[in-house]
Amino acid sequence: MITKLIVASIFILTFISSGIAQENANAVLKNIQDTFNAISDLSAQITQSVNDKVNLKGKVFYKKENRLRFEFDKMLIISDGETSWNYNKKQDKVIITNYDSEGNKILSMRQILFEYPEDCELSTFEYEGKKVLELIPQDDTYGFNSVKLFIDSENLITKVLVEDPATGKIQIDLSNYQLNKNLPDSYFQFSPSEGSQVLDLR
């Protein structure tokens, strides 16, 4: 959280330097966007924690445009950019939705990098040798209080930290990136097996 400054001199210094900080934040964002645009596909190890407790661990695959695949122990989430499949392995149940439905928006890496920043105040700082880009919504359009993107020297996102008023702190760690490996389109399609319970919400 941003601590309110009550010492007048510090407040004035912060006010004067805010324009420079904004410029730096925009430069950091552009570097991330340029790196993302140059990638045709990627895969990475992914770990999600909620309030410091790990609840998902697996692998993520991405391919332009907006094709995604998340592989977890008990769950498989796949999108071809038009349709999304959420498959619960234990229940043998799949929920099918349109990719652009409200619940799938968080899956869009392009939305996080290109749309969210337009409606957020940006700032940047360094933490443990990594650049951090913070997005704070300017209104209540989005359901989060802030998003912090931790960036490595190659402008790849290694951690996403979301402060959510309903859920709390959501942390997503990304590691072991592999870039531009020509992932097959079949990775981003899903056909329920015979006997699976299918709930089509399109």
Image: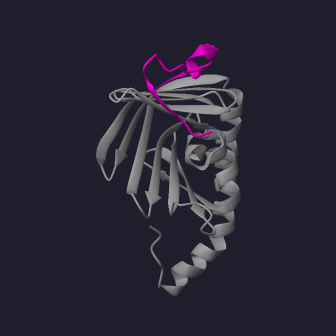
Quadrant that contains the N terminus: bottom left
Is any atom of residue 134 visible in this view? yes
Question: In the displayed structure, would residue 143 be above or below residue 196?
Answer: below
Is any atom of residue 181 visible in this view? no
**Where does the image place residue 33, in percent across and percent down from the top left?**
68, 40
**Where does the image place residue 29, in percent across and percent down from the top left?**
66, 47
Q: Which residues are drawn in magenta?
A: 176-202
Q: Residue at point 56% right, 18% down? A: 187
Question: In the displayed structure, would residue 33 be above or below residue 92?
Answer: below
Query: Image quadrant of residue 41?
Result: top right
How many numbered circles does the render carry? 0
Quadrant that contains the C terminus: top right
How does the figure colour the protein chain or chains? Answer: one colour
Q: Residue at point 65% right, 45% down? A: 111
Query: Image quadrant of residue 101?
Result: top right
Q: Is residue 108 left or right of residue 93?
A: right
**In the image, is residue 116 part of the stretch drawn in magenta?**
no
Question: Which residue is nearer to you in this view: 145 or 128?
Answer: 145
Q: Residue at point 47% right, 85% down? A: 6
**Where does the image place residue 132, in percent across and percent down from the top left?**
52, 50
Q: Residue at point 35% right, 37% down? A: 56
Q: Residue furthest front?
A: 195
**In the image, is residue 190 part of the stretch drawn in magenta?**
yes
Query: Image quadrant of residue 135?
Result: bottom right
**Where does the image place residue 84, in percent across and percent down from the top left?**
58, 33
Question: Which residue is nearer to you in this view: 36 or 49?
Answer: 49
